[in-house]
Image (cartoon, helix red, strand yellow):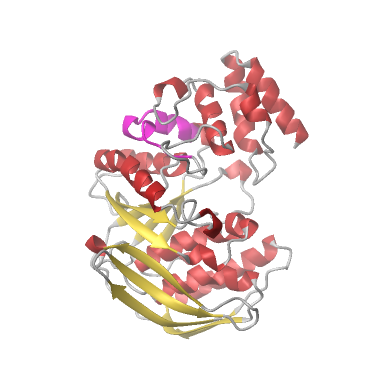
Amino acid sequence: MILSDLSLTRDEQRVRASARVRWEDCDQPEREVFIETDKAFSEDLSPNPHAFLIGCLLPAMHFGEKRIHLDARIDPLLQEGLRTAMGIIQYWSGGAYKPLTLEVQTGSIPHVSLAKGRAGMVLSGGMDSLAALRRNKLSCPESHPASVKDGLVIHGFDIGGVVERGMKYHVFERAMAALEPVARDASITLIPVYTNIRHLCDQRELWLEKFFGAVLAAVGHAFDSRINMLQIASSYDLPNLGPCGSHPLLDPCYSSYELRILHRDLELSRMEKLRIVAGWEAAFQNFRVCLANVKDRLNCGQCEKCVRTMAGLLAIGALHRTRAFEEDDLAPAALSRFNIRIRHREPFYEEMLPLLKARGREDLVRTIEGMLAAS
């Protein structure tokens, strides 16, 4: 793979950092990859070579490229981290993914960030990121360098990430609107970001188990003139770790001297995160866990993520208090149609069982136990 033509362009509404991707050892089409933001943040975005090197690494490994060539100076700390990341992916894949040769210039000199001490966080509107933001704001004084000041909301992941489902910009705008009261309450700035890096390879297993954390990090590096820390909420807690696109072993490998990637809250279970969000009214009335992106509803109440979240909120006695779901209860039939083996979901359901049993929801307990037995 050859990365070239790194550039920054502007129009009346947005600014775009981009690079040209050419493949050498597979028949994938040449294309432009980009990271964009609104004009209001045009001074904060740059065509940082770190962003595109990190963002393109996993697709290059997936398609069997032998090298990535980029005529730019790369931080030696990042180079070391990428070699480690490739080793982790090789191990997780049983050797199917081979490390690449990184043909880059070495020894970049870190610039002094004008935003020294400014932290950002990736915000999806889901339980992981909202719990992470709340915890940060309760534990870090505003004057502390790790106190989050910016929330990066990314189009090109669950919204706009799968080409055949369409770009759904209206859904993204709705998600941004839902996060506005959260941002006001937390005293952070929301930054909309648009990227097509996922479109390099939208093979589901690659995305979920190896790739998406790298794209989060790539976006962070494109904003490293504004932030010098990017916080990423954990997907799993310590007892339930396994291969995942965002992982405490993997995410820090994408750090440079100028931008630290922090994978946080590993000790928190999913139910503990639900309790944190349920105790924060601004977030509890405006969270978005849904991947269905249906019309006129923030959360569809029917997909696996919605149903799982509703069950968890029932378990802590909080479902009836949120308007983020229209439903106040959950029938066993809504749960039983899902295969919970996909993407290591069993721990999320196992944790609910004693809480649901204590609330007398034997109907849901029996259903979940049957789902776990089947898996």
User: Number of callouts in the render?
Assistant: 0
Looking at the image, residue 46 sits to the left or right of residue 95; the answer is left
Q: Which residue is drawn at 47% across and 32% down?
A: 274
Q: Where is residue 196 in the image (x, y as percent from the top left)?
A: 46, 65
Q: For residue 344, what is the image quadrant?
A: top right
User: Residue 68, how many percent across, how many down?
Assistant: 55, 80
Vertical side of 96 occupied by 309: above or below: above
Please give the name of the residue rendered at 39% of the width and 66% of the height, measured from the top-left corner.
35
- 276 drawn magenta: yes
Instruction: Name above or below for residue 69 compared with residue 304.
Output: below
Q: Is residue 141 left or right of 108 when viewed as pictured?
A: left
Left or right? Give the position of 18 relative to 355: left
In the image, 100 versus 108, the foreground residue is 100
For the N terminus, give its image quadrant.
bottom right
Q: Is residue 110 visible?
A: no
Residue name at image x 66 percent, y 75 percent: 64
Task: Spot the residue most to the top.
Answer: 360
Work out whether residue 309 can be spotted.
Answer: yes
Q: Is the magenta stretch mostly helix, strand or loop?
A: helix
Q: Quadrant of residue 276?
A: top left
Q: Which of 256 and 306 is in front in this view?
A: 306
Which quarter shows the C terminus?
top right
- What range is drawn magenta here? 272-289
Residue 309 placed where, x, y %? 52, 32
Query: Along the line of sight, which residue is nearer the eye, 351 or 127?
Result: 127
Q: Where is residue 101 in the image (x, y as percent from the top left)?
A: 59, 81
Residue at x 42% of width, y 44% of height: 129
Specify whether residue 112 is painted magenta. Answer: no
Q: Residue furthest right?
A: 374
Q: In this view, does 276 lie above or below 176?
A: above
Q: In this view, does 374 lie above or below 95?
A: above
